[in-house]
Amino acid sequence: MTTTTLNIQGMTCGGCVNSVKRALANLPGVGQTDVSLEKGQATIEYDPAQVSPEQLKTAVVDAGYDVKA
Ligand SMILES: [Cu+2]
């Protein structure tokens, strides 16, 4: 497993955090995710053989949030 951190803009409440978590959990190869509303960050454990960082980013964007890095 590899860990990456995404900087996410647009999360305003716990519901947003859950939406982001759900979007990430729907992808194959995603393990533990830790989404912080205060920091606007998601720390994501994933298997690079099953999912790419771009796909992680796209899932968050598709859920309606902006990803900075
Ligand atoms: Cu919200």
Image (cartoon, rainbow, N blue to C red):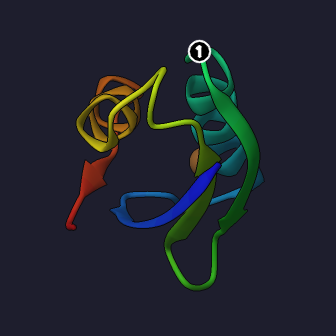
Answer with the quarter of the image where residue 65 lies: top left
Classify 6 as above or below 14: below
Q: Where is residue 8 in the image (x, y as percent from the top left)?
A: 38, 62
Classify 31 as above or below 34: above
For the C terminus, the quadrant is bottom left
Is 60 left, or right, of 55 in this rendering? Answer: right
Classify mark 1: residues with Cα within 10 Å, few (<14), some (14-19) or many (20+).
few
Dot 1 amino acid type: Pro
For image coordinates 23% across by 37% down, the residue present is: 54
Q: Position of residue 63 (x, y in %)?
A: 41, 27
Dot 1: element: loop
Is 6 left, or right, of 54 in this rendering? Answer: right
Quick check: can you spot residue 12? no
**43 or 21, which is in the foreground?**
43
For image coordinates 67% across by 50% down, the residue present is: 17
Disc 1 Cβ-to-ligand 1 distance below 8 Å: no
Classify 48 as above or below 23: below
Answer with the quarter of the image where residue 51 lies: top left
**65 or 47, which is in the foreground?**
47
For image coordinates 38% across by 27% down, the residue present is: 59
For image coordinates 59% across by 42% down, the residue present is: 46
Q: Where is residue 42 in the image (x, y as percent from the top left)?
A: 56, 62
Q: Position of residue 41 (x, y in %)?
A: 51, 71
Quick check: can you spot residue 16? yes
Answer with the quarter of the image where residue 57 lies: top left
Q: Identify the residue under disc 1.
A: 28
Is 21 left, or right, of 66 in this rendering? Answer: right
